[in-house]
Image (tube, rainbow, N blue to C red):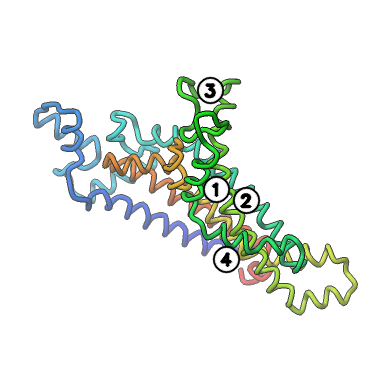
Amino acid sequence: MKYFLQRLAFYAFTAWAAITINFFIPRMIPGDPVKSLMARFQGEMNSDAIQSLYVLFGIDKNASLWSQYVDYWRQLFHGDLGLSFSAFPSPVSEVIAQALPWTVALVGITTVVSFFLGTGLGVVAGWRRGSWVDGLLPATTFLSSIPYFWLGLLAIYLLAGPDSFFPASGGYDPGLVPAWDQYFIPSAIRHSLLPALTILISSVSGWILSMRNMMVTVSAEDYITVAHAKGLRERRVALSYAARNALLPNVSGFALALGFIVGGTLLVEIVFSYPGLGFLLFRAVGAKDYPLMQGIFLVITISVLLANLLADVAYLLLDPRTRKEG
């Protein structure tokens, strides 16, 4: 319990630091976002209206930095992330809520599938060295070294086209309205196949390599030799002794991967113009939409921290030594 409380305090402090940095970054970036917004709409406004915009976006120059900081925290506690410049006057939370399900569905499913598939194959490859699974290592090493977006470009070149089943971009066919019906869902699934395949091929290779190497290391430990000497079944030794201990380093990696699900695989979403959070961040940077960038960074940061907290809980359950230390 002591260990868990210490980790909880650490993550609470880290969350405070991340939110504070997130508050200061837009205020340190050169330029005036309100003037940029006015220039885009090409409208004339009086001084009172301009001052109202500064107050609305939380960058009132007449207010002290401390009062702005306190107001920022007050807005966060009320779930208010501000207003988007590029989608004005839509709230940032609303814009993020529209893109978040796309990323969670695409990257979330592929991350979980690649972890369990790669970990399972890694266990077999590490325990049965010299088998056909172990012979796949050169290919997995090659695939894991290729960036996601290169695989995406290659997939578009080889598999997408005018007469192809696989669309080259977008999240669904033009003209459709997002809804849970027989028209939209098949279209959304078809548009997600190439991005999902790209992420799956690249990420599953990394899980196979890491798990295989840990299994090889654990197989040489004394407790594995003792388990064999006791006459335990091969499957029990492999799963209950070797794989359980070899899995521990992968847990933290999986937690980080879960955290970055929210951020999405940015370059993959850009390559496929997939309407997820990563592509939304790319457009926000291009439009200098500081509130939207701020909101996306905050969501990603909190997601990573929560995922790491879950990893620590998993360590408590999987490693008895951690419980003894607590």
Q: Which is more toward the observer, 320 or 233?
A: 233
Specify whether 19 is left or right of 43. right
Q: Mark 4 against mark 3, which lies toward the viewer?
A: 3
Disc nearer the start of the sequence (4/3): 4
Residue 199: numbered disc: 1
**Kind of element beneath mark 3:** loop
Q: Mark 2 points at which residue?
A: 114
Residue 179: numbered disc: 3
Q: How far apart are marks 2 and 3 (CA)?
A: 28 Å
Disc nearer the start of the sequence (4/1): 4
User: Percent from the top left, x then y, of residue 233?
Assistant: 88, 66
Disc nearer the start of the sequence (1/3): 3
Q: Which is more toward the observer, 60 or 291?
A: 291
User: Percent from the top left, x then y, of residue 318?
Assistant: 68, 62
Q: Mark 2 against mark 1, which lies toward the viewer?
A: 1
Q: Mark 1 against mark 3, which lies toward the viewer?
A: 1
Q: Which is more toward the observer, 281 or 13?
A: 281
**Kind of element beneath mark 2:** helix
**Kind of element beneath mark 1:** helix
Q: Which residue is drawn at 51% across and 59% down?
A: 8
User: Percent from the top left, x then y, of residue 161?
Assistant: 50, 33
Q: Distance between the residues labelled 4 and 1?
A: 38 Å
User: Percent from the top left, x then y, of residue 31?
Assistant: 17, 46
Q: Mark 4 points at which residue?
A: 2
Name above or below for residue 299 compared with residue 3: above
Q: Mark 2 against mark 4, which lies toward the viewer?
A: 2
Q: Mark 2 against mark 3, which lies toward the viewer?
A: 2
Q: How far apart are marks 1 and 3 (CA)?
A: 26 Å
Name above or below for residue 95 compared with residue 147: above
